[in-house]
Image (cartoon, coloured by chain):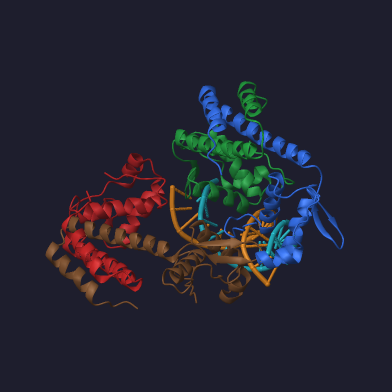
Chain colours: A blue, B green, C brown, D red, E orange, F cyan
Amino acid sequence: MINIDYRSGVAIYEQISKGFEKLIYCGALLKDEKLPSVRELSAELAVNPNTIQKAYSALEQKGMTYSVKGLGNFVAGDTTDILKQRYDELLAAIKADIDELITLGYGRAALEKALLQFNENRGGI
Amino acid sequence: MINIDYRSGVAIYEQISKGFEKLIYCGALLKDEKLPSVRELSAELAVNPNTIQKAYSALEQKGMTYSVKGLGNFVAGDTTDILKQRYDELLAAIKADIDELITLGYGRAALEKALLQFNENRGGI
Amino acid sequence: MINIDYRSGVAIYEQISKGFEKLIYCGALLKDEKLPSVRELSAELAVNPNTIQKAYSALEQKGMTYSVKGLGNFVAGDTTDILKQRYDELLAAIKADIDELITLGYGRAALEKALLQFNENRGGI
Amino acid sequence: MINIDYRSGVAIYEQISKGFEKLIYCGALLKDEKLPSVRELSAELAVNPNTIQKAYSALEQKGMTYSVKGLGNFVAGDTTDILKQRYDELLAAIKADIDELITLGYGRAALEKALLQFNENRGGI
DNA sequence: GTGGTCTAGACCACA
DNA sequence: GTGGTCTAGACCACA
């Protein structure tokens, strides 16, 4: 479900929380669905329980999950709200990068061409 | 010349090296131009000389500057090469974000409209 | 495990990183094997932790190790790749020396004889 | 006559002394021939006189030149002795590299082939 | 416990 | 003056 790359330099707890974020964004985990328990995931990933706990706290603090004592952690809110929030993040990031490109003298025409190409042909998974 | 935000969570040495990178990208510092000496910048920014040293080492290691003992640190390479490298970084980042947007179901038409708008009206500095 | 010569003029951090490089080259340290912790090695070698840190950073930057916060430093990559790289370095060095010898008028016949002798009878450790 | 590369990381005084060593080795400067005066070379290379002085001191200390107060610096000794010394240095370096290659498991047959090839076809200047 | 960053300050080689 | 290395020791995030 979630892969950890120890060499990436990214903190393990962050790789875990980001991993769940993506699962929620893409609909693999739905509203009120239960996340694996801390112990369970700790065993499965061979990761310190403190680290799992920290990942879950980060998710909760971001409003993507909620926790119920004695029951576990669950996916929060409407997926649509969460999605909208992620859309805004990504668009803002793209805008910032475009601004920098233009500031550095990258041609508008070439940029427009590149952007439309990105939109047409996706190279991703 | 360079502003440090102690609250940002970003390491000081990294803020400094990134700051110089931007000055080089935008042409404010040209090839073979001298950077402030370690002690000079240390005094100006009220930052420990070791931290400046670390920032300069990072720049040198990235190939953006070179150092000559007894003389100082200098901007390396042709600015055009460095710029090209930065263009590629930014375009790759944009592409990755666009890919994720589409994966998350963001409409291609809406995206195209947003992208073109970013390209037309810049909001940045 | 690693010996430091304070009189050699070579920076301590470099002696340490080179020492680990050799241990990795010769297979004494295998892929994903843990290096001693910064504090541990600092105590063992009676060297400041910062200096150990610098040696480890150099190794990581060279791609020979990777670090995980809270866990430690580990040997990276396939040993075979690293070995290949070292072979190339050594062969290039030999080639450069041979070129200089010939430029300086050292006889090809005598050189050939010497080279083959080196290859037959090893004097090293 | 002598080129200085400020980016090489090698100390300037060392580039200068090595430069003269090569000129002496290859016979461009003969026994008792005069080297440029400190001031002269300082002006020509746009290098601090202290640095030239240090380069000349290094040459003298190595026995490759001698200085006469009021007259200047001159090439010392028989070129043959100097050459012989250099031959020995280079051969020792090659031997050390070959030893390491074999220790690291590089095949003797492949090595022999490579060495003979280096001797036959020079790629240098 | 483990790595990463930072300060304060010393000392050295080099120009 | 200029960069490079090192010690001593503190503090933080992470596991």
x then y, percent, for residue C113:
15, 69
Q: How many marks?
A: 0
**D119 and D67: which one is in front?**
D119
Residue A100 as seen in the image, left or right of residue C116? right
Any part of residue D74 in sight: yes
> Residue C50 location, x and y as percent?
60, 63
Is any part of residue D31 visible from this angle?
Answer: no
Please name the residue shown 53% across and 67% down the image. Answer: C32
Q: Which residue is depicted at the point 33% across and 47% down?
A: D38
Q: Residue at x 25, y 66 (%)?
A: D110
- C112 displayed left or right of A92: left
Displayed quadrant of residue B101? top right
Q: Nearer the viewer, residue D92 or A81?
A: A81
The x, y position of residue B35, in whole percent, is 54, 40
Please state the horizontal and vertical placement of residue B100, each as a whole percent of the image.
Answer: 62, 40
Q: Nearer the viewer, residue E6 or B123?
A: B123
Relative height, residue C2 to residue B26 (above, below): below
Q: Is residue B63 above or below residue C64?
A: above
Q: Quadrant of the C terminus of chain C?
A: bottom left
Q: Nearer the viewer, residue A11 or C123?
A: A11
